[in-house]
Image: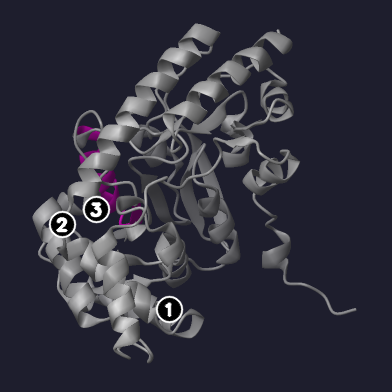
Amino acid sequence: MTHFSDRVERISISGIREVFEAAGEGAINLGLGQPDFPAPEHARQAAADAIMAGEADAYTENKGMLSLREAIAAKHEGDQGIDRSPDDIVVTAGGSEALHVALEAHVNGGDEVVIPDPGFVSYDALTKLADGEPVPVPLRDDLTIDPIRVEEAITDDTAAFVVNSPGNPTGAVSSEEDVREFARIADEHDVLCISDEVYEYTVFDGEHHSPVEYAESDNVVVVNSTSKLFSMTGWRVGWVHASSERIERMVRVHQYVQACASAPAQYAAEAALTGPQELVDEMTASFEERRDLLLDGLADIGLECPTPTGAFYAMPKVPEGFVDACIERGVIVVPGEAFGSHGAGYARISYATNVEELTEALDRMAAAYDAVQ
């Protein structure tokens, strides 16, 4: 039999998928990182119009449609004050591909990549697929990323470090002071900072800040996407922006892996970025309401939970057996160790579901908690 690559043997199917498969039919899904809002009507209409007009039948430029890249550049100029040329943006198949091309373009075999632990499952896996070595660093008690620990983890073999704010799976938002420190670390250590900002618009307390706002070098690559900003997870449109030199390398990877992002989806993404933005505020207000409902419910159960200030996740500390007891009662939550070894003793709960289901899920979680005490 032919053999498999060492790289693919280093990774496995996400632990999140294992939880889904263990749940029974009709379970309340608090494990899915997907907003429960429809994509903007004007975005869907733009895609339909492009399809019917025959404008979405052909490849776009490798980097993506110029008009979309102009819209992305305008978005970052308006939100972060960044003067980024549309030529320095690559439109990708979601934020996942953006992370992939960033790591592939910058990581050599054996290079280290410092990642948050617990952190998004792709950071570890994509580092390994790039033949790199993940270096997990634990979070603070409030589940924010600690710049001191990031800096302590950097060695001569470090190619990059990943930051994520607002964070998945934690819901934590990094302070401006911490983000300035991430930029300083990238500058002073001449190491790449990959900033995953796909939850940028979902902030309840404080403000979103990006390391690219403060870096004096070009050592910051920003990953973003329409998936969580505009509830367009299925459209698979993300992007990466960086200096010209870095973009030129990343597009080399992208052109062979993907050629270009889906043309109809690009039309939809452009419309989402340039059209009415009411959905953004509506989603944020709704998620904040659900967060407060969840936190009150967890406190009533007796579960300690750092207050998430963004995204739509909470990570309470849970007793042993709690996740299995929830699944047995028809509620899907994800064990913290699915996001790294330092996630043990926690569970990730997504509150991107309706209030009625969330209320019912809390009742079932209370029964699960009583069962394992």
Q: Quadrant of residue 296?
A: top left
The answer to whether the residue labelled 1 contacts the one labelled 3, judged by CB atoms less than 8 Å apart, is no
Residue at position x 55%, y 48% in the image: 121
Give SS at disc 2.
loop
**CA neighbours of label 1 inside 10 A, class few (<14), some (14 to 19), many (20+):** many
Residue at the disc numbered 3: 187
Residue flagged by tag 2: what amino acid is it? Pro
Mark 2 and mark 3 lie on one chain; the one further toward the N terminus is 3
**CA neighbours of label 3 inside 10 A, class few (<14), some (14 to 19), many (20+):** some
Residue at position x 40%, y 82% in the image: 260
Q: Name the quadrant of the N terminus.
A: bottom right
Give SS at disc 3.
helix
Residue flagged by tag 3: what amino acid is it? Asp
Mark 1 and mark 3 lie on one chain; the one further toward the N terminus is 3
Residue at the disc numbered 2: 276
**CA neighbours of label 2 inside 10 A, class few (<14), some (14 to 19), many (20+):** few
Q: What's the CA distance linking mark 2 and mark 3?
A: 37 Å
Residue flagged by tag 1: what amino acid is it? His
Residue at the disc numbered 1: 254
- Which label sits on residue 341? none
Discs 2/3, front: 2
Q: What's the CA distance linking mark 1 and mark 2?
A: 30 Å
Q: Quadrant of residue 366?
A: top right
Coordinates of residue 265 in the picture (x, y in percent): 36, 73
Residue at position x 53%, y 13% in the image: 303
What residue range appears in magenta? Answer: 177-197
Coordinates of residue 216 in the picture (x, y in percent): 15, 55
Whether residue 54 is visible to the viewer of this picture, yes or no, is: yes
Discs 1/3, front: 1
